[in-house]
Image (tube, rainbow, N blue to C red):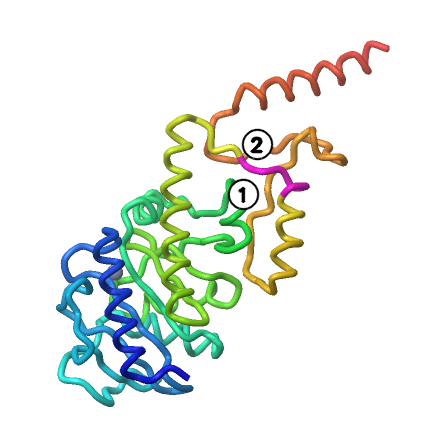
Amino acid sequence: MISEIKLKSQVCEIGKRIYEKGFVASNDGNISVRIDEDTFLVTPTGVSKGFMTPEMLIKVDGDGNLLEGERKPTSEIKMHLRVYKERPEIKSVVHVHPPYATAFAIAGVPLDQATMPESIVTLGTIPIAEYGTPSTDELASAISPFILNHNGALLENHGALTWGENLDQAYFLMESLEFCAKVNWIARQMNGDRELNTTNVDRLLEIKRHLGKESASPSGVQTASNAHAEKITPPLERSLTAKDIDLIVEKVTQAVVKLLK
Ligand SMILES: [Zn+2]
């Protein structure tokens, strides 16, 4: 088991990373770690996560009562504690405002497209939790429906939250989440955020099952190249590509020829 001193220095290290990566500005963001069943280390409010020192961290219980520390805990503590309450195996929660993911959260676009193998296997589908006033029970209730089957969620008009079985995992999921949002955004500018088809996604989901990962994943799109595809289902919210149009023309032509026979 990792000592509390080591755990505190790891939280400060991750704080530095989220600040240096531009996942937060100023004093934004918060990190928490479970020490035991009902004891948690949380970051303080009003302090830049890039400049935290171990003695600034605060210890609280599962109801948010202060157990140790000089400072006030993060105002977002309810959101963190809700995740721990609903998933006893979860050991760490990270909340930040990374620019691309936050833009998706503002636009109301979830990260649910099967665009990259790594995001399907590791990250899974990232839904959007309905807007809730920061620091209130509203926000904790908004994420509640997604805690069991996801690794994180976008917070509508606010930012992103990830949770994991240790601090590194929660942080790396956030890196993956922001990377996925960034790449999808760039691909959209090229009108090319094409999704993998269901056959390829099924193969990835098989790998995911072998790795013991259970979170929800995008299902991919059905295309004519799928062995049993009956219709083309282009993803919503994007224009048809030239390939999509060719496939539609081909299908329509086949149907007309059949009628004329
Ligand atoms: Zn926030």
Depth order, front residue of 63/204: 204
The secondary element bearing badge 1 is classed as loop
| Residue displayed at 28% across by 65% down | 14
- Residue 111, image x, y percentages: 44, 47
Whether disc 2's CB lies below 8 Å from ligand 1 is answered no
From what the image shows, is residue 158 above or below residue 247?
Answer: below
The secondary element bearing badge 2 is classed as loop
Residue that carries the numbered disc 2 in the rendered image: 234
Residue that carries the numbered disc 1 in the rendered image: 114
Tell whether 227 sits left or right of 261.
left
Magenta region: which residues?
195-200
- Residue 202, image x, y percentages: 66, 47
Ligand 1 lies in quarter: bottom left
Residue extending farthest top: 260
Residue extending farthest bottom: 67
Residue type, numbered disc 1: Ala
- Residue 197, image x, y percentages: 62, 37
